[in-house]
Image: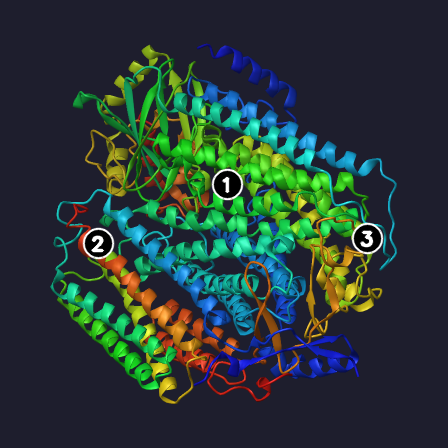
Amino acid sequence: MAERVSFERKLPVGAIDTRASGWWAMIFTIFTEASLFAYLLFSYYYLAVQPHLPGTFPQGGAPDLSLALPNTIILLASSAAVAWAQFGIEHGSRWRLVAGLGLGAALGLVFLIIQYFEWAAKPFGLASSPYSSLYFTITGFHMAHVVVGFLILLALTYWSGRGYFNRVRYAHIHIGALYWHFVDAVWLAVFFTFYITPLLGLKT
Amino acid sequence: MSVSKPVCLSGCFAAILWVSPAAGAAPLQYLTGAGDKADPVVALTWGVIVISLLVIVVITALLVGAVWKKPRLVMAVGEKTAIGPAEGGHNWLWIGVGLSSTVLLFTVVWTVVVLAKAITPATKPLVTIEITGKQWWWQVKYDSSDPSRVFITANEIHIPAGQPVQFKLIGGDVIHSFWVPQLSGKTDTIPGQINETWLEAKNPGIYRGQCTEYCGVQHAHMGIVLIADTPADFRKWWDHQLQTPTIADALGASEFVAHCAGCHTVRGTIAAGSLGPDLSHLMTRTTIAASFPNDGPTLARWIANPQSLKPGSLMPAPEITAQQRDQILAYLETLK
Amino acid sequence: MTTVSDYERAPTVAREDPQLAQHLEKMWEGKKGLYGWLSTVDHKKIGIRYIITAFAFLVAGGVEALIFRLQISWSNVHLLTPEQYDQLFTVHGMTMIFLYAGPVLSGFSNYLWPLLLGARDMALPRLNALSYWIYLCAGIFLYSAFFLGFGPNDGWFNYVPYAARAYNAGPNIDMYALGMILLGISTTVGAINFIVTFLRLRCPGMSINRVPILIWGTLTASAANIFAIPAVSLAFFLLWMDRNLGTHFFDVTAGGSALLWQHLFWMFGHPWVYAIVLPAMGMVSDGLPVFCRRPLVGYTVVALATVATMVLGFGVWVHHMFATGLPGVSLSFFSAASIIIVVPSAVGVFAWLATISLGRPVFTTAFLFFASFIVLFTIGGVSGFMTGSVPVDWQLTDTYFVVAHLHYVLIGINVFPVVGATYFWFPKMTGKLMDERLGSWNFWTMFCGFNLGFFPMHISGLLGMPRRIYTYGEGMGWDWLNLITTLGSFLFAAGVLLFIWNVVKSYRYGVSAGANPWDAPSLEWATTSPPPPYNFTVIPNVASRHPLWEDRLEDPERKEKSFIGVGLALDQGKETLATTSLDAEPDLILKMPDDTLVPLLLALCLTVIAVGLALVNWWVVILGGLCTAISIAAWLWPEAKLGETAVPAVTERGNG
């Protein structure tokens, strides 16, 4: 029988907070997705500075803030709810986890619904102009990420309800929350580009 | 600044380094230049060629030197040997990278100097020509402040020798690239923007070019013929191109109008189509369809069956009898 | 209240012994038969699969080239129609650059990384399997278009407007776009895997200044891919939208921009060409010193030069667009950057030359490929230097000079190192040596054939021969040069066949290699040949860059020595060690997944989405999307065995 000794100290086992491989994988997934949005917004800015007929970029003038601004608040609130949920499980509270995730998911769904109405109210369609192509494509890419995030939050809510996680082992929550906050941050960049830059003078 | 020295040098190099049996018979080569825009670039081109060849020779020599003199070490499978010291060799890095960086920096400076010369002509061009790249031919429009002196032709370009000529490059459908190697580097014709370039031919002569941006199935047959005339001959040529051709052959003309006017223009007739080249003075051009010799048999074959010469060409075979074809051919041959 | 201590244990430190090995073998060996083949997550199996698939694409791309080379061997040949020629050169480029050059390096890296780093697998084994399956699906998707007669036909960089529906009506470009987006997912998840593995799975003692240069090469390429691939995936997606949904991103007639395509494409394209050579350069930096019997000269500067090349590589993309009518300031900047980027490459060249000069060369076939690569790298490098100078580039661009350049850099800096790497690591992968005599024939045929084929292209380019022309007239001065090129290409192809023959023959009849046939210094040579499924019976502990040379290498800076046969056993299930990012101190015990079919299923679901988009059939897309969601949910479902849930695994408490 070969001699065996114990290592000088104990090591944690499994997917624990930022030491989980999945957490690092999500960080770099976020880097690549952030790059995708950077290139999308680059396309917007590149086309914005090309010559256009007056009043066509943005098409129909600077887009209306009356739905987009409250919607931004709603998305930020959903991030806050998810952060509250994570804070909850870090302190051992499963109910705060489930409630926060559920609230975050619900607010995300509200965001999607409001954005759908905003899309429906636009006087132009996907194929109307370069601006309209950019508008629906970039907000569409973002919406797709929100949908994915929403499904992730649903899954997390379910798994949390089933008691899978505790104050030590909650890597899935941490990783999913990270993704959700990223989607929120992207929205801020998209919102700034479409809704604020025309007011700052980037328009034809 | 004299350009004769770089031209002489490049001529010497061309003579020495010419390995290919194609010496002198490569119309699109650019190791020699023929004008003020090309010459500084030719010198720089030779400069970087020489640097590159020297680098290849030196590195190869160093490699051969590194392996040559040593007794070959033969190891058995799994045999362990002594391992050389880990230190040493940093001089290689310092000297090698130091020398390389110096040469690279020198090239950057030379590049920027030549670039400035290549972008701006020494004198303001007096002639402006608009080129529109189309699949797979070139529309050529001679611009003038006097509207009565503006006219359109195709594929063959005349310029006055000894002075810079301005070119405006317009994208007609897809991206093409306008290139007359002896006189200038390439500039693309890109839809949605107008690019500007210039070139200059020191002496009268015929200079060939070709499209150099893949643009579809007949990219290979999108040639350019650029003829530099003396200023007097150039003016005569321009005046001649402005003239409306008289209709010497009424029958041929009517056949032409019936079958070709949808795409082609011949001034003086009602043919005013713009999908294909303007044919008003077709017989003053040395090529047809941007690539093929402008002689009777080739022109006849082109009219009868364009796909046989240029498969994929956008010109449909006109539905005509052999007799009609001969009549149209005869008419075209009057368009001098 | 639960705390971390409820999920900790003090792992056993043990000596290598057969009982432990047998115990590990049972846990790691994977499932058998077809099910095992389809569900494996073993990085070694996945790596070999990548390499074999990539070589298959290399042969396909080569055959395409030989066919169209015949068409332009002389003026006015009528072997192919222009449409056939255009598809052949496009598919050739697509195959070599996307389906061979990147994946073959992913394959070698996949196989080698855990062994080089002292780990039992990559950080994310299922993601590893996924990246391979998506690659295979994307390759089949792209080639199905070609075999059905509508392969991509607008060159591998696919410029608009020619790629737009108005000028290219068939499905050719749609298939290219969708296949490339799918392939991009493969490359991206692979890149993520490499980066996480680098940050977390190095064995104790392997600080970042002790990793082999291949690690630096692949890491750098992976980091670049994370940021670069979205540009091209987006470009292709926007093009697909323009072609199928009527959008106007690139539609100039409606205010879009044709140059937007070029910017997005080359912002990816330029970093990509560095990503497909830097890992190969790393393999040379690791393999060449073994055959010089001394460590690489200038490890630190070579590692830094690798990173510097990639970082600078993000700042030069416009040099592919010099003829598009850009302002002078922009031209000057990108020209200067494109010339300066040669400096870090020079670092590598002189480091390799110094290593050979100060070492004692051993003339194995691997050495021949690694040494000759230096000359080919130099030729490719100087022709690139020439095109970096804008006024010169205005003559050189879009001629055969650039074709010469790109083949010297791709064949010289990717293919030659890859073949050398095969000779070097084949014994480790298979337990057999490749035939050295056949190897010598292989090398000289490839070397002579390659140079005979491609050096004349510099000249035909300088004589004005444009790229991508299916024919040319007589009297252009190009006939003899093209004939020589075609003959050289066939000779080169014969060399490649000799290589494949040597691989097959040696696999069956090769001489037994043993653990370390080359007396090499790095950790992979401390395992058996081939390595067991768990790589290391105990986790190694390293104290230098060259653990197996420590007994013979004087190094006053080294304070300890490496321990390979004694270390953490980590035998309570499929486990490996996670360490801290900078200094590689033990940090966490990672639970590794078993074989599973889910990655294959997910790859198929994503392919269904691609097929749906190709058919513009939203029901198929939705079906694919649903399957994708279900597969991902199955994959990510929290598992106690992986240590993801509150329930601790049975053996976690106490010592064990």
Query: Percent from the top left, x then y, of residue B296?
Result: 42, 31
Q: Amino acid at mark 2?
A: Tyr
Element carrying mark 2: helix
- Image vertical order of residue A128 relative to residue B71, above or below: below
Where residue B36 appears, x then y in whole percent? 42, 17
- In the rendered image, which quarter contains the C terminus of chain B? top left
Mark 2 belongs to chain? A
Give amino acid for label 3: Arg
The residue identified by callout 2 is A131
Nearest the camera: B137 or C310? C310
Cα distance between the residues tagged 3 and 2: 68 Å
- The coloring applied to the image is rainbow
Q: Position of residue C99 (x, y in %)?
A: 55, 59
The residue at which mark 3 appears reads as C552
Q: Residue at x 30, y 32 (%)?
A: B279
Q: Chain of mark 3?
A: C
Q: In the image, which is nearer the foreground, mark 1 or mark 2?
A: 2
Residue drawn 53% across the image and 35% down it: C465
Q: Are marks 3 and 1 in contact (CB under 8 Å)?
A: no
